[in-house]
Amino acid sequence: MPLRLILVGPPGVGKGTQAALMEERLGVKPLSSGVIFRAEIEADTDLGQLAKSYIDRGELVPNGVTIQMMLKRLRSDEVRKKGFVLDGFPRTVRQAEALDVELETEDVSLDCVILLVVDDEVVVRRLAGRMGCTKCGEIYHSSNKPPRREGLCDKCNSQLLVRKDDNPETIRERLRVFREETAPVAEYYRAKGLLREVDAAGDAEEVYAEVTKGLPS
Ligand code: ADP
Ligand code: ZN
């Protein structure tokens, strides 16, 4: 049975890192709304142009286009076959409700929703200094995980880039949006008995061990 999982947590908590480990080790398809939006921006599509104005300010992209974009991905054969781990979606209760309708229509259910918990200060420290590879997506950090050569990816030698929304002011706004819009999503799934909370202060392997504990195999 393919796994169907959701990762919920503040920006910078390590959702993307955990999703990548799950893809590698559990074979599930990671679906990251942030990665998909950034690809749309890169390709300069209509959706990308719309999304950019919100993302650069640390605000949420409107529910309608976000839901449409993510449901389309969920309907792919690959996702149907492998299962999924969602990262960054749903981020509002409206989005969670739309996802529920979709899963019901597909006659499948979620295995688990994992809430990654960490202090705000840790998040700010992790995001300020974060750099990503423009080609392969590998993430670096100026002090925690510096690349061997400044500004270049260890893996593929491509240019590293600091995300425009990873500046202190926008990070604060994203944390505020998380508390207001996304924390209720965790409560939505808690009420359904699907939520598991995991302390995400440790390193990626420690968090992964906790995250996958008790998953159906
Ligand atoms: P982070 O989790 O580090 O904040 P993401 O890469 O997940 O970063 O998202 C970056 C930005 O993309 C968000 O700040 C928001 O503007 C937009 N975004 C991502 N997912 C959603 C969503 N489900 N609904 C609305 N906006 C979203
Ligand atoms: Zn790279």
Image: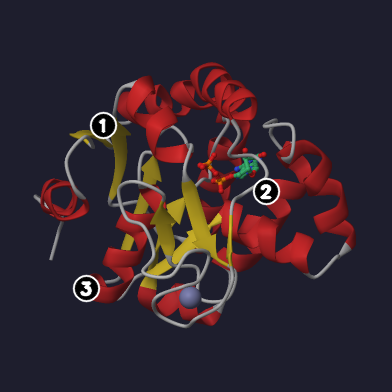
Circle 1 residue: 193
Q: Residue at x 76, y 66 (%)?
A: 42
Circle 3 residue: 25
Q: Residue at x 45, y 22 (%)?
A: 183
* Circle 2 or circle 1, nearest the eye: 2
Q: Residue at x 70, y 30 (%)?
A: 59
Give the structural element (helix, strand or loop) at label 1. loop
Quadrant of the snapshot with the C terminus: bottom left
Mark 2 → mark 1, Cα distance in angstroms: 23 Å
| Mark with earlier residue (2, 3) | 3
Residue 181 in view: yes
| Mark with earlier residue (2, 1) | 2
Q: Position of residue 124 (x, y in %)?
A: 44, 29
Give the structural element (helix, strand or loop) at label 2. helix
Residue 12 in view: no
Look at label 2 and name its amino acid. Answer: Ile
Mark 2 → mark 3, Cα distance in angstroms: 28 Å
In the rendered image, the vertical position of residue 108 relative to residue 12, given as above or below:
below
